[in-house]
Image (cartoon, rainbow, N blue to C red):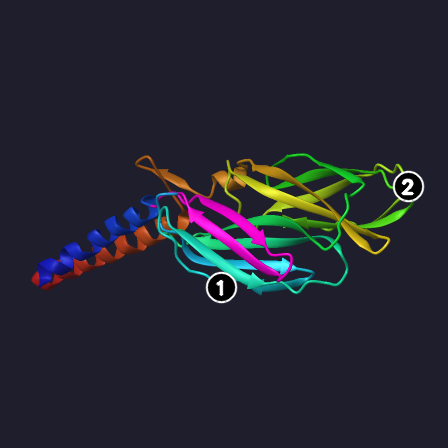
């Protein structure tokens, strides 16, 4: 029995390191479909990676109301899941959009998310006369995305800006309502902050420019990508040991376990004496 206690803790250390370094890849393929008659919204997700996608939550934001879709909580590699919810359509015809967010975790319980802006039409819809250009941006802690608009409407319109990013990025304050005269071409800066985004990864940014004219809704959706750069603060989040990047929390666990091992070993020696 004593020999078992001697070897148990080092085995735990090895297992902890295996959990930290053994996570695979999760790659989600997502499709969204809306029935413009019934308001049913279906989200199909396929796990194209080689690791189990855990704790999946799909939410849909529509007209300021957020609901959680029904669907499986786990997806194995190459498995697909259907997530469904119901939208409450307005009586105003035209273009609409729903914001679909998917949150999930990997084997190490690290949290990730994706966001998709889904455009669809209800009743008679036209073509938006507001043109938008949204450029990609690099973020090193903070960054600024640039949105350029141009109105081809013949009269003045009041447009609303909606900006969406994954949970890993924080969107700063912007002017959400803007009055556009005919031919107006303003430039809008959108401040961004890295909350928990991984260095070296790209994250989608979505903007929807909406306005209403003659009882019809119009929308101009645009997408850009934020490239997250490594910052000095990021580089300090892991330490390389034996060729492996280990976060401080795991180093602390290893140190605590090592202290316990030494304590048990020394106590055993004192008992023998």
- The residue closer to the viewer here, 190 or 64, is 64
Say above or below: 186 vs 43: above
Where residue 27 sits: x, y (%)?
A: 44, 43
| Segment colored magenta | 23-48
Residue 25 position by quadrant: top left
Q: Tell me if residue 195 can be seen.
A: no
Q: Which quarter of the figure is the N terminus placed in? A: bottom left
Q: On the rendered structure, is 231 left or right of 64?
A: left
Residue 95 covered by magenta stretch: no
Say which label, 2 or 1, has the lower sequence index: 1
Q: Is residue 89 left or right of residue 67?
A: right
Give the percent coordinates (x, y) of residue 188: 77, 41
The residue under the point 46% across, 50% down is: 45
**Residue 221: percent from left, percent from top:** 69, 44
The answer to which quarter of the image holds residue 56 is bottom left
Q: Distance between the residues labelled 2 and 1?
A: 44 Å
Q: In this rendering, does residue 163 appear at all?
A: yes
Classify 90 as above or below 98.
below
* Front residue of 261 and 194: 194
For label 2, the crowd category at 10 Å Cα-Cα, with few meaning under 14, some 14 to 19 and many 20 or more, is few
Q: Mark 1 points at which residue?
A: 70
Q: Residue at x 37, y 37 (%)?
A: 240
Please tell me which residue is depicted at 91% across the width and 46% down the height of the picture. Answer: 156
Q: Image check: 53 left or right of 125?
A: left
* Residue 189 percent coordinates (x, y): 75, 41
Looking at the image, residue 6 lies above or below residue 51: below
Q: Dot 2: what SS?
A: loop
User: Which one is in front, 32 or 64?
Assistant: 32
Q: Identify the residue under disc 2.
A: 154
Tag shown at residue 2: none
Q: Does the magenta stretch include residue 33?
A: yes
Q: Dot 1 surroundings within 10 Å: few (below 14), some, or many (20 or more)?
A: some
């Amino acid at each position: 029995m004593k020999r078992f206690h001697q070897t148990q803790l080092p085995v735990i250390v090895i297992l902890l390191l295996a959990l930290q370094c053994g996570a695979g890849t999760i790659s989600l393929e997502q499709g969204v479909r809306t029935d413009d008659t019934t308001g049913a919204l279906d989200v199909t997700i396929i796990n194209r990676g080689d690791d189990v996608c855990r704790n999946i939550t799909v939410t849909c934001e529509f007209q300021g109301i957020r609901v959680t879709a029904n669907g499986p909580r786990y997806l194995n590699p190459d498995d697909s899941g259907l997530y469904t919810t119901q939208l409450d359509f307005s009586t105003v015809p035209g273009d609409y959009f729903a914001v679909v967010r998917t949150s999930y975790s990997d084997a190490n319980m690290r949290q990730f998310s994706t966001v998709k802006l889904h455009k669809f039409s209800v009743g008679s819809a036209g073509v938006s006369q507001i043109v938008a250009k949204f450029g990609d941006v690099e973020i090193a802690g903070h960054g600024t995305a640039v949105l350029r608009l141009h109105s081809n409407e013949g009269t003045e319109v009041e447009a609303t800006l909606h900006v969406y990013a994954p949970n890993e990025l924080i969107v700063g304050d912007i002017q959400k309502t803007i009055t556009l005269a005919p031919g107006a071409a303003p430039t809008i800066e959108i401040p961004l902050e890295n909350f928990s985004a991984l260095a070296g990864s790209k994250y989608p940014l979505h903007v929807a420019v909406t306005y209403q004219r003659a009882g019809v809704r119009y929308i101009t959706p645009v997408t850009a990508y934020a490239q997250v750069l490594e910052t000095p603060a990021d580089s300090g989040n892991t330490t390389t040991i034996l060729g492996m990047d280990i976060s401080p929390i795991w180093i602390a666990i290893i140190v605590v376990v090592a202290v316990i091992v030494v304590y048990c070993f020394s106590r055993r020696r004192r008992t023998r004496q």
